[in-house]
Image (cartoon, grey):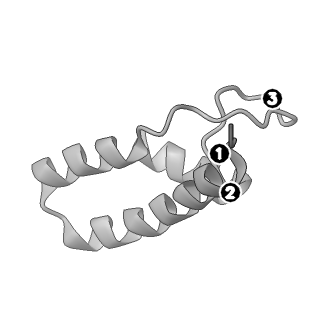
Amino acid sequence: MLENMFVLIKRFGFVPNSHQSYNTRSQPPFLSSLIVEYYHKSKDKEWLTRAFSFLQVEYNFWMTQRIHEC
């Protein structure tokens, strides 16, 4: 599931909440929690480094396109 999310981030810059190409809505930002859980089980630092790069892309999406000032 995480690898699939990485593919979506690579393609769209975020994890879309549906398969429609015009969709600009993202899933709630649970990716970081999933990455932490996986790392605690696997202890794979090489994978964690790779995962972090995708997490940075998703974080950028949330900080630049999902913040609305009141």
Q: Residue 64 — which label? A: 2
Q: Amino acid at mark 1?
A: Ile
Picture residue at 60% right of the left edge, 42% below the top: 15
Q: Earlier in the sequence, mark 2 or mark 3?
A: 3
Name the foreground residue: 30 vs 46: 30
Q: What whole-number distance in Å separates the C-alpha atoms at marks 2 and 3?
A: 22 Å
Rendered image quadrant of residue 51: bottom left
Rendered image quadrant of residue 68: top right
Q: Quadrant of the N terminus?
A: top left
Picture residue at 19% right of the left edge, 65% below the top: 44
Residue beneath disc 3: 20
Residue beneath disc 1: 67
Q: What whole-number distance in Å separates the C-alpha atoms at marks 3 and 1?
A: 23 Å
Q: Residue 40 — which label? A: none
Residue, far right: 22
Determine whether, in the image, residue 28 is placed left or right of residue 69: left
Tag 2 near tag 1, CB within 8 Å: yes
